[in-house]
Image (cartoon, rainbow, N blue to C red):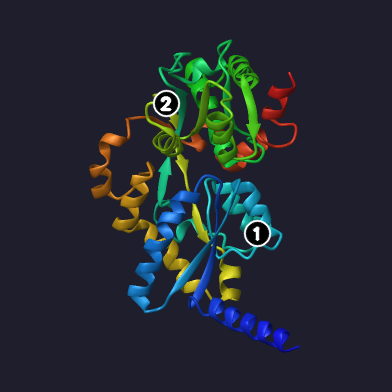
Amino acid sequence: MKRIKTAFATLLIASSFNASAADQTILNSSYDIARELFATYNPIFEKHWQEKTGQTVEIKQSHGGSSAQARSILQGLSADVVTFNQVTDVQVLHDKGKLIPADWQSKLPNASSPYYSTTAFLVRKGNPKNIQDWGDLAREGVSSVFPNPKTSGNARYTYLAALGYAQKSFGKENEAKQDDFLKKMLANVAVFDTGGRGATTSFVERQIGDVLITFESEVNNIRKQYGEDNYEVVVPKTSILAEFPVAVVERNAKRNGTTEVATEYLSYLYSEEAQRMLAGFNYRVHDEKVKAEFADRFPEVELLTVEEIAGGWENAMKTQFGNGAKLDQLQRR
C-alpha cells in the first residue's frame, strides 16, 4: 500500500509538472510534408511569444494529407490553427462545421496565405530519362510518383498543373488532346501514395519511379537531405501557383482559451524573421526584402492559378476530383 501511495503521489507530481510546463498549449494541424518546417518555426514563435507577453506556450503538431486533417477536425480533433496546402481544406471547416468564419481569407494578408510554392520535379542523378517538362511525363518508359489526388492537396496541385500545361499546349477547347495527355501521364504513375511524405519514401527509399512530382520547396529539401549529388531538380517553365492558406479554428480556440496566442502564431508567419525561415525551406514568400535575398534560389516560372485552369477550387473539386468526375474517367479508360 505504501508503495502504491508513493507511486500515485509521483504520478500526481509528474502530471502537475507537465500541466504547468507551459502557460498554454495549442495544436497546429498541418499538411503531410510540413513536419520539419514547423519543427523549426515553433521554437522561433515560442521565443517571440514569451518576449512579447512573458508567457510560455507549447505548440503541438498533427500532420497528414490536408484533406484527411480537415476531416479529423470535423470529427473532433481540437486543433487551434490549421496550416494547410489547399483552400478547400480550410473552407470545408466553415462549410461543414462552422468552425471558422465565412470571411477567413480576409483575416490575414495575401488571402491568408503567408507563403506559396509551385510544383516541380525531382529526378535521379544525370536525369537519365531527360525529363524537362510536363509533356515528358506522358512518354512511354517514364515512371512517375506523386500522391493520390483523392487524398492529397499536394497531388491535386500536380494534376491541375498538368492540366494547365495541356490547356496551353493544345488549346483550352481541345479537351480530347488534353484528356489523351492526362490519361497517359496518369497511366505512367508507378504508385499513388496517400500523402506527400509517403511519395517521397517511395521515390527515395524504395527507389520507385524516374521522377517525383511535389512542391518545389519539397524537392529542394529532399535533394539537400538525401544528397545533392544523387538528385536534380527540374522546375517546368509553366506550373501552378500553390498557396498555403492558414486559419484560426475559432470555435476550438475560443473553447480552449487560446484565441490570442493562436492568432499571433499565424500572424507571426508574416514577420521578416519567419519569412526568412520559410525561404530557407525553399518556399516562396511575400516579404520584398527577403524575396530579394533569396532571388537566386527561385527560377522564373509562369504560375497559372487554379482559377485560370479550373475556374477555382470549388469547381475543380466538382469537375475534376469528385466521384465520377474527370480524374475518375481518365483512370477508368
Name of the residue lying farthest toward the top:
140
Where residue 112 sits in the image (x, y, percent)? Answer: 45, 54
Q: Which secondary structure, mark 1?
A: helix
Discs 2/1, front:
2
* Residue 133's disc number: none
Instruction: Report which residue position mark 2 lands on.
Output: 230
Image coordinates of residue 135 in percent, x first then y, are: 50, 16
* Neighbourhood count class around disc 2 (C-alpha, 10 Å): few under 14, some 14–19, many 20 upward: few
On screen, residue 94 above or below 226: below
Q: What residue do we see at 40% from left, 62% from top? A: 43
Q: Nearer the viewer, residue 314 or 237?
A: 237
Residue at the disc numbered 1: 73
Q: Tally the marks.
A: 2
Image quadrant containing the C terminus: top right
Q: Is residue 307 visible?
A: yes
Mark yes or no: residue 160 visible: no
Most foreground residue, 231 or 57: 231
Please state the horizontal and vertical placement of residue 161, each as a whole percent of the image.
Answer: 51, 29
